Amino acid sequence: MERRVFGATGAAVPVIGQGTWQMENDDREGAIRALQAGLDLGLTHLDTAELYGRGRVEESIVAQVIAGRRDSVFLVSKVMPTHATYEGTLKACERSLQRLKTDRLDCYLLHWPGSHPLEHTVRAFEQLVQDGKIRSWGVSNFGVEELEEAVRIAGPGRIACNQVLYHLEERAIEHKVLPWCERANIAVVGYSPFGNGRFPRPDSAGGRVLASVARAHGVSPHQVALQFLVRRPCLFAIPKASQEAHARDNAAAAGLRLSREELARIDAAFPRGPDTGELPLL
């Protein structure tokens, strides 16, 4: 499994990881098996949040998945903006640790910009680092203006990552957010890389390009899409897989190498569109 340095943290993290959003709606045992299979195949970047199933995903799925193998997992969770006061962030982290049955997170994120002063959230994150409860911290769904404010507050080299919506038909981050994060040495983690159920149809123009490239390599169109979405050094992806077969397909994407011509074909088939100045969210 290919690993890359995760922003300024120095940690080598798998370029493809595993997301758990909406996993509370899946068959629990099947989801656990899928995540465990993913870990076995090197998908050890495991992302969750207190929001997911109101804590049920952390407590009833992820905790069981990482039991006995915590040291091999790069574990990420998130605090909801409504909890992101100084004290609220500390308490939310403690609740997540209890649900996950672990003593630390590898990275802790603010789920999206909220109404509480960011200074208070950042101060809590730094306290959690000092206390050994988290090893690094980052943000999610932050545009350039929010990122600039966060760096102004925390200083350079403190924000590990920005987790954002990124798939073939939603490439808005490439206009400003991705280049800004590259310059600031902040990892960009793409969530919902398959479009949350809106993967390009096989009979669409883009779908036909994916199928053609996939046939040339003997892989699936989903693997081609994943490899395109991690084509730049700061990019990571966290696809969700609630079935073992899907986890295996995702893991195999890390070994795929696309040529410049193939990348150009995919780029042309899925134009990023105009810069509206808006950061897309699900």
Image: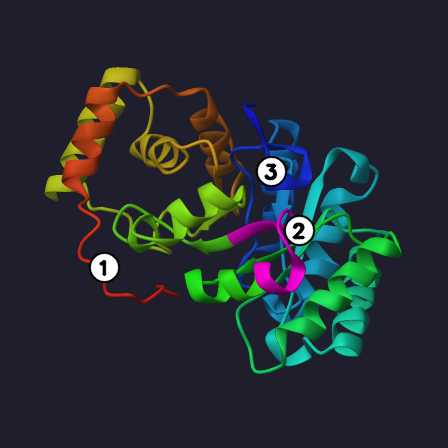
Q: Amino acid at mark 3?
A: Phe
Task: Determine the residue positioned at 59% across, 62% down.
Answer: 152
In front here: 55 or 97?
97
Q: Is residue 29 above or below residue 231?
A: below
Q: CA distance from mark 1 to mark 3?
A: 27 Å
The answer to the question of whether label 1 and label 3 lie on touching residues, with beta carbons closer than 8 A, is no
Tell me which numbered mark, 2 or 3, is placed earlier along the sequence.
3
Q: Where residue 132 sits: x, y (%)? A: 87, 52
Element carrying mark 3:
loop
Q: Where residue 151 sits: x, y (%)? A: 58, 58
In this figure, which residue is indicated by the disc labeled 1?
A: 275
In front here: 62 or 29?
62
Which residues lie in the magenta part? Answer: 151-162
Q: Residues within 10 Å of mark 1 (few under 14, many from 20)?
A: few
Q: Is residue 220 left or right of residue 204?
A: right
> Which disc, if any, is residue 174?
none
Q: Where residue 70 sits: x, y (%)? A: 80, 40
Q: Is 137 inside the magenta-drawn segment?
A: no
Q: Residues within 10 Å of mark 3 (few under 14, many from 20)?
A: many
Task: Determine the residue positioned at 59% across, 48% down.
Answer: 31
- The quarter in which the C terminus is drawn is bottom left
Q: Residues within 10 Å of mark 2 (few under 14, many from 20)?
A: many
Badge nearest the viewer, 2 or 1: 2
Q: Amino acid at mark 2?
A: Arg
Q: Where residue 122 sits: x, y (%)? A: 69, 66
Element carrying mark 2:
loop
Badge nearest the viewer, 2 or 3: 2
In this figure, which residue is indicated by the disc labeled 3?
A: 6
Element carrying mark 1:
loop
